[in-house]
Image: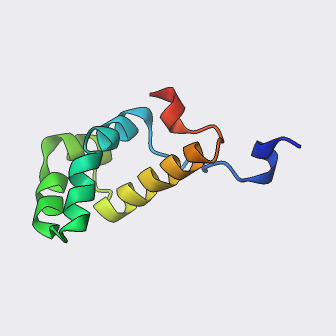
Amino acid sequence: MDKTSVQPKIAEEWALNPDQMLFMLQHHNAIEAAFANDDTAWVAEFMATSEYRALFGEMGFDEAYDRYETTLAEGRDGNPSMASDI
């Protein structure tokens, strides 16, 4: 049985586009450090950058990060994901 038929793929409207995914991957360590230290000021500054706004528009960080984690998790499960396009 094909594994992709058992587990649902990320819905198109939920998945990050390749540019968004690359941006999140490039900042992965800093994001994880901010979470580990409950550094909400860093997250606010990160969201206010012109790069973040250009890629995510009005999307909040929680939603962007949830989409990022979902894409990473799907990739780890061996399913096709946006991560393979980067």
The answer to whether 21 is drawn above or below residue 62 in the figure is above
Residue 33, given in percent of the width and then of the height, sits at 21, 58
**Residue lying at 57% horizontally and 46% vertically, measured from the top left:** 76
- State which quadrant residue 27 falls in: top left
Residue 12 visible in the snapshot? no
**Residue lying at 29% horizontally and 47% vertically, measured from the top left:** 28
- Residue 58 appears left or right of 50: right
Residue 36, given in percent of the width and then of the height, sits at 24, 66
- Residue 4 appears left or right of 25: right
- Residue 56 appears left or right of 52: right
Residue 39, given in percent of the width and then of the height, sits at 15, 67
Residue 24, given in percent of the width and then of the height, sits at 32, 44
**Residue lying at 51% horizontally and 54% vertically, measured from the top left:** 70
Residue 25 versus residue 59: which sits nearer the camera?
25
Q: How many numbered callouts? A: 0
Q: How is the image coloured?
A: rainbow
Residue 17 visible in the snapshot? yes
